[in-house]
Each structure stands twice: as C-alpha cells, then as structure tokens.
C-alpha cells in the first residue's frame, strides 16, 4: 500500500511540474566581441512603411530577458513575419533572422529567455509590408554587466 501512495504522489508531482524556460543566446559572446559596423547609427525617417519597436526591458548579462520586436503596418497593409529580417551590425554582420524564427508571432518576434553578453548591441531591422512599403531601422539595446560581489 505504501508503494501505491509513493507512486501516486510521484505521478502527481510529475504531472503538475512546470516547465522551466531555458535561456537561449540571442547574441553570442563571440559575435559581441566583433568590431561594430561604423554605419550602425540609430536611424529614423519619414516612411509609410511599418513601424518597428524593440522591447528588452533592462537586461543584465548572465540573466535571461524577454526580447520583443513589434511591427505595426499602416493603412490596411499587413506584414508577413517572413518579411522581417534582423541583422546584428558587426563586422562581419550576423543575420539573426534564422535564430529568431522559432519566436515569430503575428506581430514580429517574442523571445522569452534571451541571452546576450554585456554591452551595446546594434540591430538593423528590415520589414516589408503587403503593399511593398519598406522600413529599415537601426536600434541599439544595452545589456548591463553583472555586478561582482
């Protein structure tokens, strides 16, 4: 009888256990140590193309963070997530699009548990909507160094 109780408790624990999201690299340390592309300046312009917004919160090195790219089309246009490209502006450049494919949403990308080393990271985001309007914008996000004890 006691083995039945143990087996039942074990089954209950295993069935109610929550899955822990494992962190995945958005940017590797090797990529971050490459020299910056000199053309990697934040940009904006007047365009009818989709609006791009990047959200990272306040990430720290060694701590997973949520990385999100939201794309908003205008004037009734739509955006196919396959028409969003993300390039890490280093020399040589690193195309992050394939790395982000598993995190595609209807509005862009949402990567929970992203990792990136400390530093300032320039990204070029290129988007094309259903009416052929294009947006190419450069954004930067910072990852703070982990304080030493």
Image (cartoon, rainbow, N blue to C red):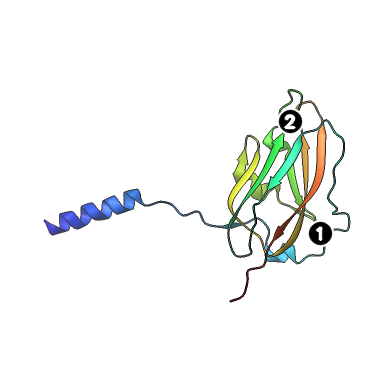
- Of the two numbered discs 2 and 1 in the rendering, the one whose residue sits closer to the viewer: 2
Against 8, residue 82 (above or below) is above
Residue pushed farthest bottom? 149
- The residue that mark 2 highlights is 73
Q: On the rendered image, what quadrant is the C terminus found in?
A: bottom right
| Residue lying at 82% horizontally and 42% vertically, measured from the top left | 136
* 132 sits to left or right of 72: right
Disc 2 + disc 1, Cβ < 8 Å: no
Residue toward you, 17 or 148: 148
- Residue 17 pos. (x, y %): 37, 52
Q: CA distance from mark 2 to mark 1?
A: 30 Å
| Residue lying at 60% horizontally and 65% vertically, measured from the top left | 62
- Residue 47 pos. (x, y %): 85, 33
- The residue that mark 1 highlights is 92
- Residue 76 pos. (x, y %): 73, 23
Q: Earlier in the sequence, mark 2 or mark 1?
A: 2
Helix, strand or loop for disc 2: loop
Q: On the rendered image, what quadrant is the N terminus found in?
A: bottom left
| Residue lying at 64% horizontally and 64% vertically, measured from the top left | 61
- Residue 45 pos. (x, y %): 87, 39
The part of the image, by quadrant, that contains residue 37 is bottom right
Residue pushed farthest top? 76
* 50 sits to left or right of 2: right
């Amino acid at each position: 009888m006691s083995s039945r109780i143990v087996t039942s408790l074990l089954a209950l624990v295993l069935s109610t256990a929550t899955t822990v999201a494992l962190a995945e690299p958005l940017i590797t340390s090797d990529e971050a140590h490459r020299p910056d592309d000199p053309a990697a300046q934040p940009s904006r312009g007047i365009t009818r193309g989709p609006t791009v917004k990047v959200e990272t919160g306040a990430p720290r090195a060694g701590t997973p963070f949520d990385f999100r790219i939201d794309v908003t089309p205008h004037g009734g246009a739509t955006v196919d997530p396959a028409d969003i490209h993300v390039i890490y502006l280093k020399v040589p450049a690193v195309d992050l699009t394939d790395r982000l494919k598993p995190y595609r949403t209807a509005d862009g990308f949402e990567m929970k548990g992203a990792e990136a080393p400390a530093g300032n990271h320039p990204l070029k985001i290129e988007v094309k909507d259903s009416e052929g309007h294009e947006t190419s914008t450069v954004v930067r996000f910072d990852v703070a160094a982990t304080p030493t004890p």
